[in-house]
Image: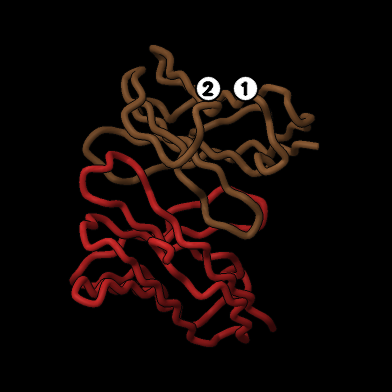
Chain colours: A brown, B red
Amino acid sequence: ETGVTQSPTHLIKTRGQQVTLRCSSQSGHNTVSWYQQALGQGPQFIFQYYREEENGRGNFPPRFSGLQFPNYSSELNVNALELDDSALYLCASRGGGTDTQYFGPGTRLTVL
Amino acid sequence: RKEVEQDPGPFNVPEGATVAFNCTYSNSASQSFFWYRQDCRKEPKLLMSVYSSGNEDGRFTAQLNRASQYISLLIRDSKLSDSATYLCVVKYTGTASKLTFGTGTRLQVTL
């Protein structure tokens, strides 16, 4: 186990709704990244948080936002859900001085 | 053109076979390279990092050719438990933790 946890494991929403996904990073890891993985694709980088600040963002619209808390846990918020937002959402944590990222089990989001 | 390209497969091989996966990347400003393994409906897990000198971990050998922007993974003596999707991953210089993934190559090892 990587020590990275995510909740919930599964979620069903309807188009236009808002969703919040949660991630607890591995102990001592101060960097959390979020990825979206659509069916049959590799994970796509959404954004990264380091010490409570967003410090990197992929090609995702502003309705994808996030937070990181003092204990380094993180949230991903998606507003105005669209059908194409249906995917596996993964968070990954990383400690200082290493390139290795450890992924949580993911949250599978279905938008109807 | 995708930043990281892989043959999606599937590769169907018998147990005991040797199989090789290839991957190309388009951005020469690349820093770190990895192979991740992903089982069906699970999260990606780091299989191994890839170094220019080549590196081996048991039955797995990874190679990097920076001049050709090409990464490979060789699996010897395939086991049924090797069946999974193998993701080629690149991290570019100066992009913090951003990992760029290929679409993955699916491997099915059969009896």
Q: Which one is in front, A78 or A109? A: A78
Residue drawn at 29 percent across, 45 percent down = A99
Residues tagged 2 and 1 counted as in contact (Cβ below 8 A): yes
SS under mark 2: strand
The image quadrant that residue A48 belongs to is: top left
Circle 2 residue: A75
Q: Residues within 10 Å of mark 2 (few under 14, many from 20)?
A: many
Q: Which mark is residue A20?
A: 1
Query: Disc 2 marks which amino acid?
Result: Glu
Query: Disc 1 marks which amino acid?
Result: Thr
SS under mark 1: strand
Q: Left or right: B47 with respect to A13?
A: left
Q: Position of residue A43 (x, y in %)?
A: 51, 50
Q: Position of residue A93 (x, y in %)?
A: 41, 34
- Dot 2 or dot 1: first in sequence order is 1
Q: Which one is in front, B59 or B39? A: B39
Q: Which mark is residue B13?
A: none
Q: Which one is in front, B39 or A36? A: A36
Q: Quadrant of the C terminus of chain A?
A: top right
Q: From what the image shows, is residue A44 above or below residue A97?
A: below
Residue drawn at 34 percent across, 57 percent down = B90
Q: Left or right: A90 with respect to A108?
A: left
Q: From what the image shows, is residue B72 above or below residue A46?
A: below
Q: Position of residue A56 (x, y in %)?
A: 34, 34
Residue drawn at 55 percent across, 43 percent down = A36
Residue drawn at 66 percent across, 26 percent down = A80
Between marks 2 and 1, how big is the CA–CA gap? Answer: 7 Å
Q: Position of residue A82 (x, y in %)?
A: 69, 36
Q: Left or right: A75 with respect to B25?
A: right
Chain of residue at mark 1:
A
Q: Residues within 10 Å of mark 1 (few under 14, many from 20)?
A: few
Is the residue at mark 2 from the same chain as the one at mark 1?
Answer: yes
